[in-house]
Amino acid sequence: MPTISVTVNGEERRAEIESRMLLVHFLRETLNLTGTHIGCDTTSCGACTVHWNGRPVKSCTIFAVQVDGDEIRTVEGLETGGQLHPVQEGFWEEHGLQCGFCTPGMMMTAAALLEENPHPSEEEIRFAISGNLCRCTGYVNIVKAIQYAARKQAGAEAAAAGGA
Amino acid sequence: MIPGTFEYHAPRHLDDALGLLAEYRDDGKLLAGGQSLIPVMKLRLAEPKHIIDINRIAGLSHIAETSDELRIGALTRERDLERSDIVRQRYPLLLDTANVIADPLVRNLATVGGNLAHADPANDHPATMLAYRASVVALGPNGERVIPIDDFFISAFETTLQPDEILTEVRIPKPNGRAGGAYVKLERKVGDYAIAAAAVQLSFAYDGTIAEAGIAVTNVSYTPERSSAAEAIVRGNRLTDDVIRAAAQAAADACEPTADLRGSVEYKRAMTRTMTARALRLALVRAGA
Ligand SMILES: Cc1cc2nc3c(=O)[nH]c(=O)nc-3n(C[C@H](O)[C@H](O)[C@H](O)COP(=O)(O)OP(=O)(O)OC[C@H]3O[C@@H](n4cnc5c(N)ncnc54)[C@H](O)[C@@H]3O)c2cc1C
Ligand code: FES
Ligand code: FES
């Protein structure tokens, strides 16, 4: 069985795994990071979204061996030093969830969007999250949550620039 | 859903990948974006014994123009087409297509080469490449060969690519003079395959007539196919409403849809007509007519 070494949320993790193990199972079962969800298991819903070298992808459709030597970020890696990520704060403040099942994937897609495009329009937000399905909210508050995060990030940057 | 067991190989060089393909032949499968292969492996519709992952091979992800062609590395992701300035400025048909394939998360991995090599008649790039009159480059043990796209698709999931060959590049002729293109797709929701879709690429003569037309449709026949009858109606003519209507009807008459969860034969045929007419109109507008 191959051994892989992956940087997950900034920490190097090594494990011996079967080649056929899917990344989502590696995260949930081998590393016990159960924040990443399995919704459809058929590449449709985006509940399993994680960042692979910075890009949001569906971890139910990647073999764990493919990410050997690479960086993976999961929803557990959004919070830093006890501080919620602006996207997490946005979902909290704008009530961007109901059952919460889609939320980890939704937040990973949102975080990647804001890294590429810090000031997205509503249309750009809706386009970016179109691979993440939500059965509860109707998306309105999810969009508001991401807009909140964009404002928060911009404010934090302005404050940092002002303080410097 | 758990795929069958396999041995995983991640060669760093094309030569090594070719060697592995030659060694394992029918037991081996190339892995590109994995967004078609892994789902079929999870369903156990495919159980390759050896997976040859080509993602670690450098030099297969370019988007570059030569004097007469746009050359796209087989490993180029849909997301890279969407963000490419060259594609955004000069290849509207290709940009439209990349934008409606699957969803943004799948497009972060899905590759152009995989889309063509998989030869799923539901995939969107085959019609687009037929409309562009593109060609693909196949690398095998005896070197490279260039395959015109019309000689590439044999049937559903079947191409003239040999089991020991790797598709390395897609080449699209550079549009010159006044030209326009469009891809119009009807889908039930984001991430679904087309109910029907049409790819159109037009170039105009000085007098405003159509010098060359490429027209092909998606997911309404068993093999990705160009609509030769529709092309013949358009070529040499001005794109009047009557010509557009006749060409769209010809594309609809020639297609061979099957009834499934996306609709009846009649509905798909009607939508093929509508998508073809819309793509022709949009291509015309974009050409500045
Ligand atoms: C939910 C979902 C929705 C989708 N919707 C659409 C859609 O609307 N339109 C659309 O066009 N596609 C759609 N797809 C398919 C997607 O675009 C695939 O990624 C694509 O068909 C295959 O590309 P890939 O790079 O993922 O190939 P892989 O899955 O890695 O490979 C597919 C096949 O091609 C072979 N192959 C790959 N690369 C090469 C190469 N360079 N040389 C030789 N053989 C090669 C592999 O061996 C395999 O047999 C969808 C996929 C999913 C999961
Ligand atoms: S579980 Fe991966 S897309 Fe639904
Ligand atoms: S909050 Fe329930 S699926 Fe999105």
Image (cartoon, coloured by chain):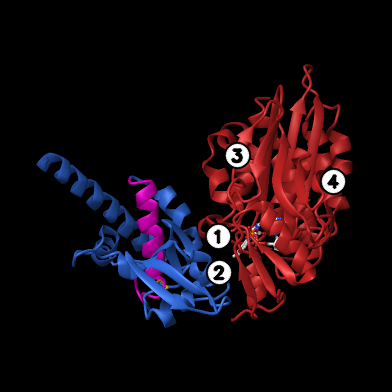
Mark 4 vs ligand 1: CB under 8 Å?
no
The spot of residue B127 in percent (x, y) is: 75, 48
Rendered view: B62 above or below A66 = above
Q: CA distance from mark 1 to mark 4?
A: 27 Å
Q: Earlier in the sequence, mark 3 or mark 4?
A: 3
Chain B visual colour: red
Q: CA distance from mark 4 to mark 2?
A: 31 Å
Quadrant holding the N terminus of chain A: bottom right
Mark 1 vs ligand 1: CB under 8 Å?
yes
Please name the amino acid that badge 3 sits on. Ile
The reply to whether the C-beta atoms of the residues labelled 1 and 2 are less than 8 Å apart is yes
Residue sitting nearer the eye, B73 or B271: B73
Specify whether B176 is left or right of B226.
left
Q: Chain of mark 2?
A: A
Q: Earlier in the sequence, mark 3 or mark 1?
A: 3
Mark 2 vs ligand 1: CB under 8 Å?
yes
Name the residue beneath numbered marker 2: A61
Q: CA distance from mark 3 to mark 1?
A: 20 Å
Report if residue A135 is visible in the image: yes
Front disc: 3 or 4:
3
- Residue B150's tag is 4
Residue at 24% x, 46% y is A154
The reply to whether the C-beta atoms of the residues labelled 3 and 4 are less than 8 Å apart is no
Specify whether A56 is left or right of B56.
left
Residue at 59% x, 37% y is B87
